[in-house]
Structure formats: structure tokens, C-alpha cells
Image (cartoon, rainbow, N blue to C red):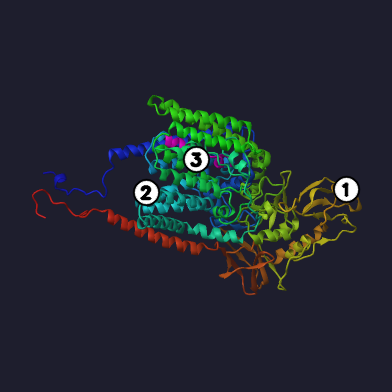
Amino acid sequence: MSTQQLAPPRVPDRPAPSPARRSARRAGLVGAAFAALVTVVAVCGGDAAARVFPYGHRHRSVNDLGNQFVPFHAHLWDLLHGQARGGLLFNWQSGYGTSFLPDLGTYLTSPFAVLVALFPRQDIDLAVYVVTVLKTAAAAAAMAWLLRTQRPGPWWAAGLLGASYALCGWSVIEASYNPMWLDGLIAFPLLCLTGEWALRGRRPVLGVLVVAVGWTANFYTAYMATLGAALVLVVRVVLTREGVRERARVVGRAAGTVLLGIGLAAPVLVPLFLSSKQAYPGWSRTFGPVPWSDLFARLMPATYSFNSPAVFVGTGTLLLVAALPFHRALPARTRWWWAGLVTAVLLSLQWEPTHLAWHLFATPNGSAYRQTFVLAGIVVIAAWTGLAAGLPSGRALASGAAVLAAAGLWASGSALTTTWGYALSAGGLALTAGAWWALRRPRLLLPAAGLLAVVLVAQAAATTAYGHKGKLAGLDDYPSWNAAHTRRAEALAGADGWPAYRTDAGRPALSGNDPMLLGGEGGSYYSSHTPDVFTRTMQALGAGWTSRGRNVQSIDNPVTDAVFAVGARLKPDGTIARAEVPPLVTVHPAGPEPAYGESPFANQELLLGAKVYEDPVAPGVCRAGTEAYLWAPEYNATARLAGGRPFRLNGSAPRNRAALQPLGLSRGPASRLVFDRPAPPRWELSCLDRPRLTAAVSALRATAATSVRVTASGLRATLPPGSRGTAVVAVPAIAGWTCDGRPSRSRLGLLAVPLDGRTTTLTCSFRPPGLVAGTAAAGLSALVVLGLAVRRRRTRRPEGAGRPVPARGQRT
């Protein structure tokens, strides 16, 4: 007898999948792959038709894509390759030192973001583009998989509907240059999938992990996706479950899954929320609904508007949804619940209370309809619900076409409609109606399905290309990495002296986040989390800004360079200007608590601890040999010294604030100040005495720290024996710093520690507020999830599993 015969057979934990189930799974994978392929072809085709990067000479990096997201991904590249200044908790490169975990959670925690590490750093724009396309394709695949999970149906149809979701107008026009929003596009079908698992009592642990990944990747759009998935689940529960108790059980399972998933994401979410409260307020606006003619115009392909909902999802999908109320293969109850949900969500876009609920109760200051992708997803699910029950009849298709035609007629009063939009919409309606009708004949399946795919790709590609045209005409754009970037980056790297001194990328900037994009440890910083204390400190010192205070610019000024230990600064001509500056930690004498006033020149002297400016010898005239500096924060034109070159000041309040501007060396009365437009109501000219500044810097260096070492999230400084007064660290005093075991203090917006004459070393460390609480919440959630996993494993194990099965003839 063989040993194999003696060995007790192993009892499997679950039965093997049936052939039908394996076949369905294969079809689902094929449908998801088909959806992704159609999406990639449409997106790349539209970009190529518009001749934007990487297919042509036009810039793709409009607005925040070039100003924020590309630089942030460049910083992530540096982190992944061990070349960044700082770590996951703190960023030494931006804003003279700022918290990084909230930025990481807002912009970079997508699982796709790490793919940028596979590209050369100079190809960071291409890396972000590839990540964007892959995210869009993943959203299509996820939706296709969800549809076949909800109801069986043809894989190719699920693939086309999944692609139409990923190619909705919101995706290809708005989220394409806000790539972190695309994580919400992926999250919506996945969260709906967790709802399906809750409905069937399956995969509770995997559902929690899906929620955690979605909320970590981008909490903002994940919140919207969660609301949408909850609405979808409510309809599914009402239509498929009977009795209050059974329905409540499903809803309870789903709610528990969401709460546990959010709990696992808490180490990122809690610091992020607290950081948002500490950020500079920026701009708030009042919601106003768009005219209905504009909304119906956006149902068409090839339309663009920055502040109206881009609800296009492909004419073939819209036709199925419009035909749904007339599709008698479905029970009336099912038809009206899904049609009602689509209508309710559409109306919620136009009503202020629901608009606020979609956006965490704050109207966005740009692109006010960010929840539109949820409507697109619900439209696609409703379309699939009808299609999976059978092809619509000719009467249903005709009725649906009439509904769309009426919407198109209403849209004729909108300025957003285009000739191309009407042509693509009308042609697509005729072709897709014919294709859905032709699918009744099996021999026409392939050509009809191919026609539906062609129409979808053509409409989505045209919408993509038209969106580029609108964005390039109405939004700022930023150059992709080129030779100018390389020269600046190499110059900054060659001047590096960190942490002995900072190197600043200078002005004019290529983006709002040049330190992350190009290198160095500069003062410019643009984020949703720009700290209030940093913006107000830089404003007091004369810095300029855009984006209503969220995009703070570096100051080209030798006094602030001395204060912030900027020993090397990149100049517009590509050269490096060097200066002898104090180290990061200086010691200031004891005295009354100082406070900023109105004049940035007096404020700089207050922070420096010495008087280095003098008043003009006559109105608009500095003494010969001094350096003239102009402060005119609301001035929006050029100014100059007579005989000198003009300098542009960008002071269009309230969005932009002009920076304190160096005008050059004065020659006395021959160098009087000249405004090229009428002088602004508020301005000040001051004259820097360079020898005084040199003396002030020497005095600070004499009593400053003798050595400074930095870590990924802290620093350690050695002070001269007997140091008294206040140690000032050239870092904004944001919440989260502790020095020598005590919460830090602030002196004029910078980190400060009182000295008693006995302190010889100073140790400061940074931990984002909320990290401990978030980690504790995640730990508790993880314990609950582990308990669920153990319990589920035990309940799935058949009775007698793990005990030997007696051989034939043996007694038990």
C-alpha cells in the first residue's frame, strides 16, 4: 500500500469554482481589458489630435497640473530614489520647511503615483501623463468588472459601458489635469463593488481594504464616490431584498466596512484634515446653479466650460438611459427606481444644499461640479441594468432618442454648444440607435458592437481635443521639462551647501513649486495646505503670491535671504548669486515680544535684529550707492529707476499680490522712481545700505549655532556656551514642532526656543498633528478587521476539517 493511500485526504476550505463560474470570471477579465483598451485609444487619440504633449508642441501642463502636481510627483521621485530633502513627514525643500504628510495624502498616495520612479527624472511630465492614462484605463476596467458582478451580460457591452464611464467629459476635460481626482473615478466602481459584497455577505475584509485604499489615494473624491456608492446600494437593497431587518443588515454591513476602511486610512486622513484647518483660507465663493441649457449642452461631446458639469458619457450610453423608462423587459419598479436615481443625482448638481453636501460643505473655488463623475457612474450602471435585461425595443429606443433630441433642442440656447458637438451628437445618436437595434440579429453582433466602439472613441477623442483647446485658451500653462529646466537644476545642484545654507530656485519661477521641481531649499510653495502662519509671515516680509495666498513666491531680497539662511540664489540669467549668511539657527537677545507692522522693510529689520534700510533722500529717490526696493502689492504694471530696465509687478488683487521688487543700484536723483502707469494708492520705496547688512549678518554669525545637522524631520544644533535670549530656527513655526521635548514657540512667525544660558544643544523634531490619533484609530480598526478575518475563516471551515479522515474499514 502506498503512502499516498495511507495519508488522510485534505478537506478543502471551499468548493472549487464551477466551470460556469470560471467562464464568467474569464469573460469579466476580457471585458475589463477591452474597456481599458478602448479608453487608452480614445484618450491618446484625442491628445494626439490636439497636438499636446507628448504628441505635439503644445503644453499639456495647464493650471495646477504644471504648477502643483508635476512638481509634487518630482518630489516623490526624489523620495523614492533617496534624493529628497526630508521624508514622509517633513519637506525641507518648500516654503523654507513645511509638513509633507498632508501633501502626500492629498496628491501622492495613489498606488499609481509610485510608477513615476520607473522613468528618468527629466521625463517627469511623461511619467505623470502615463500615470494619468493608466488611472483612466483602470477606472474603465473597474466599472466593467462591477457591471458584470451586478448582473450577467455580454462582456463587450460591459467593456463599452465601462469605457464610456472612464471617458466621461469630467474625466477627459477636468480630471485629466487634476490626476489625483482620477483616483475617485477608480474608487466609485470599487466602492460600489464593496456594496455588492455587503449585499451578498461576502469578502468583508477585502471590502475594508478597498475602502482604505480609496480614501488614502484621494479622500476628497473618495468621499464623493462613497456618497454615490451608498445611493447605488440603497437602490440595490430596495430592489433585491425584502423586509426591514434584512435591508438594515445589508446597510449595517456596508456602513461598518466604510467606517473600518476610513479607520485604516486615519494615519493619513487625520493629519490631512487638521492641516486643512491650519492652511491659509484662500478663497470662498457662493454657489450658483448653471442655466439648464448649459447643463444639457454639456451632455454633448466637444463642449467645454470651466464651471459647468461635464456630464457627457457617450451617446450610446445616454440612449440606453433615456430609453430605460420605456424598456418593458424590466419590471416597472426597477425602471423607475434607477431612472429616479439618475434624475435625483442630476438635480442635486443644481441645488445648493445637495451641492454643498457633495463637496464637504464648501463650494470649490474652481471647477464647482467636481462630483459629476458620480453622476456618470450612476448613468452607466442604470444603462447596464436595462441592457442586461435584454435589448430595448424599437419603441423604447425611439422614445429615448426623442428625450435626447429634446435635451439637445433645449441646449440650443446655450453659448456652450458647438457645431462639432451637434454633429457628433446627432450622428452618434443615429448610429448608436441603429447599432443597438441591429444587435437583435446575431450575425450583426460584431459590426454593431464595432460601430458602438467607434462612435464612443470618436466622441471621447473629440471631447478630449476640444477640452485641450478650451484649457489652453483660458488657463495658465507651464512648459514641460526642457533644456531650461535642466540648466536651472544643474546650477542649483552645483551651488548646493545644505544644511550650511539654503539654495533658492529664484524668480521668475517656472512653477509654483520650483524647489520640488528643480531642487534647492527655497521659499516658494503652492498647496492646498500652505500654512496660514507661513503665508502671513511671508506677506509681512513683502512676498508676492498667486491663488489668493495659497501660492507663495520666494522673495528676491538679501535681507530675507539672510534671515532664512539662503546662501545661494539662482538669478534669471542662470547664474548663481552667493552671499555670506547666518546658519539655520541664530541667537537673538532677550526683549519684549516683537510684532509685525505695515511696512515690509521695518518687518525685515525686526526679524533680522538690525536697521539696514534708509528712507529716500527725496520722494522716489534713493541715496546714490544704495539699492532701491519697491513695495507696491496692488500694482499691476511695470516700474523702474529712470534710465534702468523696467520690472513687472503682478498685483491684481485679490487673486495676486505683487512681490517686493529690487530695482537696482541708485545713482541718486538721476535714478528717480518711475511708474509706467498711474501710481498705486499704496506703495513704499526703501533703500538698502549693503555695508549695514554685512555688519548685521556678521553679528548674527558671531552668536549663531556653531553646527547644524538636519534629519528627515528634525534638526540638532550646537550653540555657543552661555547663549541667552531666544534661539530662532529659520523655519516657519507651523504646528507639530517640539524642541528639547517641549512644544515650540513662535517669534515673528519662525520657530523659537528660549535660552537660559545653560543650553548648549538644541534638538527639534516635527510630527504632523493628528498622526498619533490617526495611528491609534488605524490600530483599532486593524484589530477589528483581524477579528473579522479569524471569525470568517472559522465559520467557513466545514465541521471535521483538520481531523484525519479514517481509512476504509477503520472504526471512528
Which mark is nearer the camera, 1 or 3? Answer: 3
Q: Residues within 10 Å of mark 2 (few under 14, many from 20)?
A: few
Res 26 → quadrant:
top left
The residue singled out by tag 2 in the image is 240
Q: Which residues are magenta?
A: 157-173
Q: Is residue 82 visible?
A: no
Q: Which residue is mark 3?
A: 165
Q: Which mark is residue 177?
A: none
The span from disc 1 to disc 3 (Cα, nearest Å) is: 60 Å
Label 1: which secondary element: loop
Q: Which residue sits at x=62%, y=66%?
A: 718
Q: Earlier in the sequence, mark 2 or mark 3?
A: 3
Q: Nearer the viewer, residue 661 or 191?
A: 191
Mark 2, secondary structure of its residue: helix
Q: Which residue is mark 1?
A: 642
Q: Amino acid at mark 1?
A: Ala
Crowd around label 1: few <14 · some 14–19 · many ≥20 (10 Å): some
Q: Is residue 458 left or right of residue 601?
A: left
